Image (tube, grey):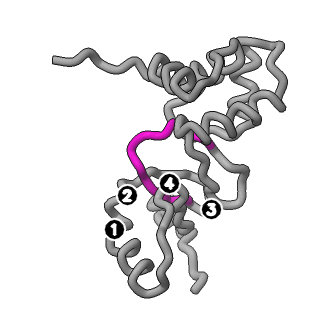
Amino acid sequence: MSEPVNPLEEILSTLRGGGRRVTVAKRRLAEVLVAAKGHRSADELTTAVQILAPEVSPSTVYRLLDEFEELGVVVHSHLGQGAAVYHLAGAVHGHLVCQHCGATQEIPAAHFDALSRDLVTTYGFLLDRHHVAISGTCALCRERGEATTHH
């Protein structure tokens, strides 16, 4: 039986394997990402990193997010009208975003299998499942009568 994988050590190992040094800023960002358990904007991540390491500048966090994404550690998504959000790479999933309350729900990528096949067949277009966000109205807002009537 194999040992459970420590997500923080896995990130640090990926950095080292990519020929990168593990600096204090990188370690703190990795810690914040592991603790985040979800989608966070760069500003939210910067604030959390600076609580642990006040000397880390916002520009460093933004640069490190690009580096982490290049190494496949994080993925960014655009959910609605707000800033891009980041989450640890892992299981590919899509997002349902309520345009009324802003609630975001992750859904399995399998929901996009038929759409993905159709897009390739019809348009030659390959869907990037890490960046799928569908805008609409959540169940709670629909119950409150805020159903979308846009067509």
For residue 7, above or below residue 91: above
Q: Please rate how many residues cluster around mark 3, counting C-alpha atoms within 10 Å: few if below 14, some from 14 to 19, many from 20.
A: some
Rendered residue at 49%/20% (across/down):
13
Disc 1 to disc 4, how far (Cα)?
A: 13 Å
**Circle 3 sits on which residue?**
100
Q: Nearer the viewer, residue 97 or 39?
A: 39
First reached walking from the N terminus: tag 2 or tag 4: 2
Secondary element under disc 3, as helix, strand or loop, is loop
Q: Nearer the viewer, residue 7 or 97?
A: 7
Q: Nearer the viewer, residue 43 or 99?
A: 43
The amino acid sitting under disc 4 is His
The amino acid sitting under disc 2 is Ala
Disc 3 to disc 4, how far (Cα)?
A: 23 Å
**Circle 4 sits on which residue?**
130
First reached walking from the N terminus: tag 1 or tag 3: 3
Rendered residue at 56%/25% (across/down):
15
For residue 47, above or below residue 119: above
Quarter where residue 148 is shown: bottom right
